[in-house]
Image: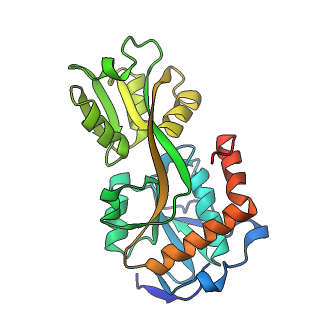
Amino acid sequence: MSTYTTTRRGFFGAASAVALMLSACGGSSDSAAPAADEAAADYTLVKEGTLIVASDLDFPPLDSFEDGEAKGFDVDLSNEIASRLGLTCEYLPPTNFDAIIPMIKQGGKADIGNSAFSITEERKAEIDFTDAYLDSNLGIAVKSDATAKDEEALNADGIKIAVQSGTTGEAYAKENMASATIVPLTTVTECMAGLSTGHYDAVCADLPVVGNMCTVSFTDCEVSVEIPTGEQYGIVVSKDNPGLTAAINQAMADMQADGTMDELKEKWFGSVSE
């Protein structure tokens, strides 16, 4: 696709029959006005009038793909940002998490990556992040009847710890649990399914996600360790597109000021975390 240049600042519908692209449009009717012009700079979009988003859509309650529909906090956030920038929004089909940053860096397929990306210096060397929009820690999940549950017991020969490839969970496990065998997989769902069936002894991933999966989908598992890593999530944007980063930052600042951000946190997490 050609690149479209815009001075505007500004998700979601049913999946197409051939599942080539998940489309979205419009946000809440109360917040459709574009963000203030003084905060805007020219930016490029892959397609005119459209904000295209890449996500793995397998990180509930942040993002997931259920019954042909994208759902989650990040999905609602993308929807609201697009509305405030005066854009419609299209989600690409679920994309491997570790492929999203290279995709955004290369350009041409998606405008942003919004998939619960922890802001790290290593990633910032490749792409730009928006301002942080959510705080998070890591968690370790095990079978509820497991004997090895704490970090010391799991950091041992013969223990297999599943992680999502390219995540801070993988980096933490490799650095701090090196005596165990670290097994990178494509999605957290694969990790948790393998834990539930006994293929792995533990899963190290973002705390909100493993907590949600233990409660909703893999009820024979539990979070046994909470790791206070103090991570923050940001939206991924190309370094060649600073105007888009600025526009999204303004939209999120407006959401914080008018209470919309807190409403989304309440909806998906049950409480507002500062």
**Is residue 58 or residue 9 the one in the foreground?**
9
Query: Is residue 46 at all visible to an observer of this figure?
Result: no
The residue positioned farthest toward the right in the image shown: 30
Side of 178 where 62 appears, left or right: right
Image quadrant containing the N terminus = bottom left
Quarter of the figure with residue 119: bottom left
Side of 36 where 23 appears, left or right: left
- The residue located at (61%, 60%) in the rendering is 77
Label count reads 0
- Pinpoint residue 32: horizontal percent, then vertical percent: 73, 73
- Pinpoint residue 271: horizontal percent, then vertical percent: 69, 41
- The residue located at (45%, 47%) in the rendering is 231
As drawn, 79 above or below 141 = below
- The residue located at (73%, 77%) in the rendering is 33
Side of 25 where 90 appears, left or right: left
- Pinpoint residue 6: horizontal percent, then vertical percent: 53, 88
As drawn, 146 above or below 135 = above
- Pinpoint residue 108: horizontal percent, then vertical percent: 37, 76
- The residue located at (24%, 26%) in the rendering is 180
Side of 123 where 114 appears, left or right: right
**Is residue 109 or residue 22 the one in the foreground?**
109
